[in-house]
Amino acid sequence: MTSLLTKFCFKNKSKTKKLNERIYDKAGYDYTLAPAMSVLKASGIRMTHKISEKTTKLWNMYYWLQLINLCILAPSETASMWTTISQAKTFVDSIQVFGMMPCFGCLILSIIKTYKMILHRPVLENLVYELRDMWPEGELSEEEHVLIKKSFGQLRFISKGYYYVNNALLISYMTPTIYFTILRNLGYDYPIGNMVFMYWLPFDVFRPVRFEILLLVQTWHAIIVIWLNVAFDISYCLFLCHISTQFELLARRVQHLFFVKVDQQLVSSYPMASVSENLLRAGGERVESYGDSYWEDRQNKEIVAIVQRHHALIRLTGDVEDLCSFALLINFINSSIIICFCGFCCVLFEKWNEMAYKSFLTTSLSQTFLLCWYGQKLIDASQKLADALYNCGWYNTGSKRARSAVLIMMHRAQKGIYVTTYGFSIISLASYSTIIKSAWSYFTLLLNFFKDKSID
């Protein structure tokens, strides 16, 4: 874990200059991939395969070893939950299952999320390489530079924060049991703690030696589950951040496609006038002296590139949906349940100085918000393109080809670009609000039901 922290969080500070300078190259793109690639490698997944065939087989063996372990663990955990419910005589006795649900939910998610990334590796690699080809090169304008720097500065900050929150969850769950086990083996009188995953096994797991061995295995399983989930979530955010940024850069490109003179009809206070002034500032007075043939040739060439880029971004968004939509559906269903059960356990059972369920609640809330926020960012970026197409001076061009292309793009852009939960709902901040409302409804219902049963 120490080496991963060093790789992930303590990169050479000189590398941060890649996004602080207006001259861009492909190394800047590789720099934005670093957080996701670090966690993916720790999980046994490589984003690209620029390695030998033998090394590829070793990486695949490492991943499948982890996945097989988790696939064996899932039925055991299910059997343990079923045993707990079947042996419970009252509702209060069955509440122990609520404490098992968060870990079980994360276990299932870790399997579903990463399996498709391996199954559809060509799609994953194509996303990486196509977005790399789209990365701008050369000197950019100040506006473009600020846009890129802001987007990927936020991504890096959020990725690190999310990584630390999940590791804090791991530590808060595992440390107490490990600490008391060490003290008990040193001769101190401490009770045997609880396991993170409540395995169903055909022997007594709380006997000496057996418990210690099982605790080591569980620690490894917990690390795998956390890192596989983090790897998927950060990769999803990375791809949507790149696609959203490309939409915003494309919107700026559309804004500067047509030149409209500032006159009595187009007053200087209009947004389009500021675009024309920027063109004049960049090209000088000769911009106004260019003839219609120059602008038509320029617009015809530029509109072809813009349309191709727009189609490519729509297709890449579809690839992200193919990779992630089913996992996101399960994730959001699981989040509603986890937020409800963790809130229930925090209120009724966990002491104020105990952090296990509080950490789980915080992680689940932040994880769901992160996924929805980047979904919203994609929607907003695609809407900016639609606005840019509407507000550009397309009506002022003599090129019928450029005018027709803009109108067709405008019609397509009005539909919006988004990622869904397997077609059930659009991932946005509105869906985050829906999840919180659902979790709160389940929580109040469960709390009232518990109070009624306690009185009885």
Image: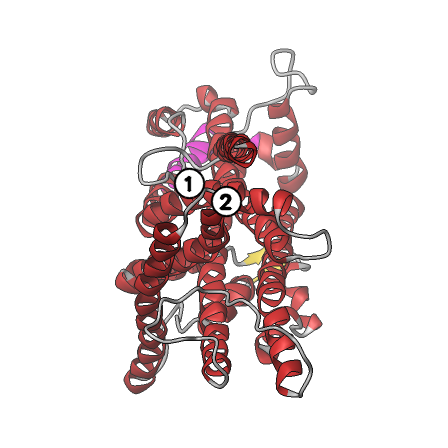
Residue placed at 61% from the left, 29% from the top? 276
C-alpha gap between disc 1 and disc 2: 68 Å
At label 2, the amino acid type is: Val
Residue located at (34% from left, 58% from top): 78
Disc number at residue 359? none
Task: Give the residue number, with chain letter if any, for mark 1.
Answer: 302
Give the residues in magenta.
289-304
Judging by the rendered image, the residue that carries numbered circle 2 is 92
The residue shown at (32%, 60%) is 79
Residue that protrudes farthest toward the front in the picture: 456
Relative to the observer, which residue lies in front, 96 or 175?
A: 96
Which residue is nearer to you in this view: 233 or 377?
233
> Is any atom of residue 249 visible in this view?
no
Nearer to me, 423 or 362: 362
- Magenta segment's dominant SS is helix
Helix, strand or loop for disc 1: helix
* x and y, in percent, of residue 446 in the image: 50, 35
